[in-house]
Image: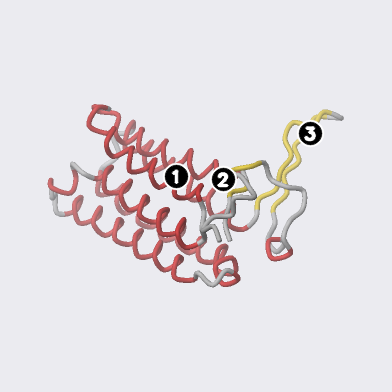
Amino acid sequence: MSFFNDSVPPLRRKQAFIDTQDLEGLLRVNWRIGEIQLYSTFYTRIDQAFLIWGLLLLLMFVTAQFFPVDWSLQATLWSTLSCIGLSAMFKWTEYWVERRQVRWILYCWLMLMLVGVILTDLGIFFSWSSILIYLCPLWLGLTALGYLCTGFGVHSRSLLIIGAMHLLGILILPFIGSWQFLTTGMLMVVCLVILAEFEWDHL
């Protein structure tokens, strides 16, 4: 018996049929101008968790790259937003992991994100250069570990591939020069949007 579900591709367009377990909290989007339909889709609770994290990460990394905001202020703001993101993640994904009996994945992500926030704050507030110069690899590495653990937990090729992409991003960073924050943010955000917009393989 195959570890993965080979009957479906790693990514595919969302199907019209929705599992009953995903109906609660479902967000439907149907943008039209008159009779012209511009965009139509739906977002499950886990899709919404991806999108809120994507928005938060976009704010964090774009600000770090382009705006001369005091780093201590940024650390305070982003720590607060990260806590909001973690709370939303728990609320919107708890039922999903319970049904698949992989609740440990939720705690794995919580631990990884808290480790990232704590290390980032320590590096900024105590001016630890050994952490500050590796902020981007740190976040890519923690996120990659989260995707890899989740991919193995729910038997998903998509998540394993995305985890590998984050690891590849760490190798690319030294060649990006001064654009590391933007590159890191865009990689993380694009992956989250892909997961929210498409149906990916899992248990």
Report how far apart the C-alphas of labels 1 and 2 lie in the structure: 9 Å
Who comes first in sequence, dot 1 or dot 2?
2
Q: Nearer the viewer, residue 50 or 118?
A: 50
Q: Is residue 2 left or right of residue 35?
A: left
Q: Quadrant of the C terminus?
A: bottom right
**Which label is found at residue 172?**
none
Identify the residue under disc 2. 10
Q: Is residue 109 left or right of residue 69?
A: right
Who comes first in sequence, dot 3 or dot 1?
3
Quadrant of the image occupied by residue 126: bottom left
Instruction: Tell me the SS state at disc 3.
Output: strand
Q: Residue at x 30, y 29 (%)?
A: 179
Identify the residue under disc 1. 161
Frontmost of labels 3 and 1 is 1
The answer to whether residue 155 is above or below residue 168 is: below
Identify the residue under disc 3. 32
Disc 2 crowd rating (10 Å Cα; few below 14, some 14-19, many 20+) is: some
Rendering coords of residue 108 (x, y %): 39, 65
Rendering coords of residue 82 (x, y %): 40, 56
Q: Nearer the viewer, residue 141 or 84?
A: 141
Disc 3 crowd rating (10 Å Cα; few below 14, some 14-19, many 20+) is: few
Frontmost of labels 3 and 2 is 2
Quadrant of the image occupied by residue 46: bottom right
Report how far apart the C-alphas of labels 3 and 1 lie in the structure: 34 Å
Instruction: Tell me the SS state at disc 1.
Output: helix
Q: Hey, which residue is sitting farthest front in the picture?
A: 1
